[in-house]
Image: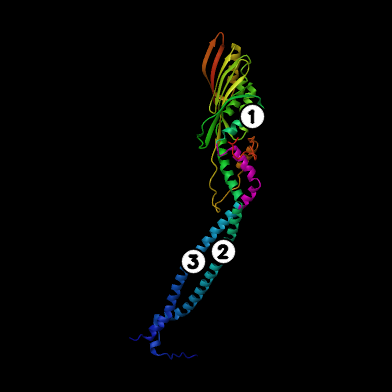
């Protein structure tokens, strides 16, 4: 059996909880120091790697910027294109009277040859027309055609005049569906 | 005062522990801070790289057709009052439609409800009803883009149709700023390509360039 010898003077002897702490602290310090060194070296390495990546990215971006600046004409063209196309889209959304002219075509076709289209006013919102019919049958045929037309939700009769010399003068306003 | 040897032993054992803890805290705070800054810079640079690469691709793709497209959109929506071009187009259209044109007038520029500058051009057109109608419908087929604002048609007993037409044509100043190099740029969308396709079918205004004569007199007032 091994004999335990303690040759230290009594001042150096540590007993009780303090002795336990000192006994525990020494290996803990070594482990913590090793851990610290590993972490510090790891962080240092990661920092260097990140810095190199950043430098490489910055160089790549500088090269791309130079290439883009060399394409300044194309850049101006695309800015102009985007600007104009946006505004053209707005203009194309503006209501046009030409659409209502196309819509009123079937009604105009109902005006007989011996009747006269006295006035036809068209804008983007409404259509108004005044027609002079020579005979009662022309007027009847026209109104029959108008009533069977499904393009307009309502047709408003503005004026209705009859003179033996001129015939029937009818003013109508068409409201679209 | 003499410090006891066992106290020194305790300090020797515990002090390195505290020093290491302080080192951990200092290196952790400084190192992680630095690394976080570099990582932020890397993610920003990566984002920039993505934008720049995409931008370069868009610019390369537009390079071949950019000039042609630019001419189309500028002819459709010029930067200055287009009344002269519109009048020239209306006259050319009237000639091909076989209708007589009179009282052609251009109004003062206004700001339309769309926020764009607009100019009204009014005129009288005489012809048969079919001719006048097809002429009015054809106004949408030329550049600069013009919208038929108002039409007033009256027919005589002889069968001639007189139409008083007012068209509105638009213009807007060109953009004056090119965005920063790192700002994103998108390629033309399908809707924008469709608009371009529509614009390519418009009748373009024809301009004649007047060449300056080289043999003029140095002093125009000399005999």
- The picture places residue A7, in percent across and down from the top left corner, at 43, 91
Q: Which residue is mark 1?
A: B93
Q: Which residues are magenta?
A: B56-80
- The answer to whether one can see residue A51 in this image is yes
Residue B12 located within the stretch drawn in magenta: no
Q: Nearer the viewer, residue A168 or A38?
A: A168
Residue at image point 60% right, 58% down:
A63
Residue placed at 43% from the left, 80% from the top? Answer: B13
Name the residue at the front extreme: B223
Vertically, is A3 above or below A114? below
Q: The numbered mark 1 sits on a residue in which chain?
A: B
B33 w.r.t. A104: above or below? below
Question: Residue B54 — which label?
Answer: none
Location of residue B212 in the rendering, given as x and y in whole percent from the top left corner: 63, 39
- Residue B2: percent from left, percent from top: 34, 86
- N-terminal of the pair, mark 3 or mark 1, is 3
Please identify the dominant SS of the magenta region: helix
Residue B131, position as x, y percentages in the image: 64, 24
Q: CA distance from mark 1 to mark 2?
A: 62 Å
Query: Same chain for the residues at labels 1 and 2, yes or no?
Result: no
Q: Chain of mark 2?
A: A
Q: Are marks 1 and 2 in contact (CB under 8 Å)?
A: no
Label ID, residue A55: 2
**Residue A93 appears in which quarter of the rendering?**
top right
* Residues flagged by tags 3 and 1 on a common chain: yes
């Amino acid at each position: 059996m091994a004999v335990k010898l303690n040759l230290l003077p009594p001042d150096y002897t540590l007993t009780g909880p303090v002795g336990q702490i000192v006994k525990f602290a020494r290996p803990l310090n070594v482990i913590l120091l090793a851990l610290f060194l590993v972490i510090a070296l790891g962080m240092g390495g990661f920092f260097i790697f990140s810095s190199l990546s950043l430098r490489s990215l910055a160089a790549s971006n500088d090269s791309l910027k130079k290439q883009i600046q060399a394409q300044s004409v194309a850049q101006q063209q695309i800015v102009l294109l985007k600007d104009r196309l946006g505004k053209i889209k707005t203009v194309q959304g503006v209501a046009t009277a030409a659409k209502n002219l196309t819509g009123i075509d079937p009604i105009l076709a109902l005006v007989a040859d011996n009747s006269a289209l006295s006035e036809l006013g068209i804008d983007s919102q409404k259509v108004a027309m005044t027609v002079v019919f020579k005979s009662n049958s022309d007027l009847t045929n026209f109104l029959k055609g108008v009533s069977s037309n499904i393009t307009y939700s309502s047709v408003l009769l503005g004026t209705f005049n009859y003179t033996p010399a001129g015939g029937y003068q009818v003013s109508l306003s068409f409201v679209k569906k | 005062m003499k410090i006891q040897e066992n106290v020194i032993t305790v300090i020797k054992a515990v002090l390195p522990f505290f020093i290491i803890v302080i080192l951990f805290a200092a290196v952790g705070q400084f190192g992680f801070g630095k690394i976080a800054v570099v990582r932020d810079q890397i993610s920003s640079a990566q984002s920039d790289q993505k934008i720049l690469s995409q931008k370069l691709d868009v610019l390369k793709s537009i390079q071949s057709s950019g000039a042609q497209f630019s001419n189309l959109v500028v002819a459709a929506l010029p930067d200055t009052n287009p009344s002269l071009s519109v009048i020239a187009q209306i006259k050319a259209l009237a000639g091909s439609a076989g209708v007589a044109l009179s009282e052609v007038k251009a109004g003062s520029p206004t700001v339309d409800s769309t926020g764009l500058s607009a100019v009204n051009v009014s005129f009288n057109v005489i012809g048969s009803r079919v001719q006048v109608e097809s002429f009015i419908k054809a106004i949408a087929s030329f550049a600069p883009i013009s919208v038929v604002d108002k039409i007033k048609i009256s027919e005589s007993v002889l069968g001639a149709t007189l139409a008083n037409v007012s068209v509105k044509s638009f213009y807007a100043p060109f953009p004056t700023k090119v965005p920063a190099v790192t700002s994103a740029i998108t390629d033309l969308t399908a809707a924008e390509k469709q608009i371009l396709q529509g614009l390519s079918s418009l009748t373009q205004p024809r301009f004649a360039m007047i060449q300056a004569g080289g043999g003029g007199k140095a002093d125009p007032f000399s005999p």
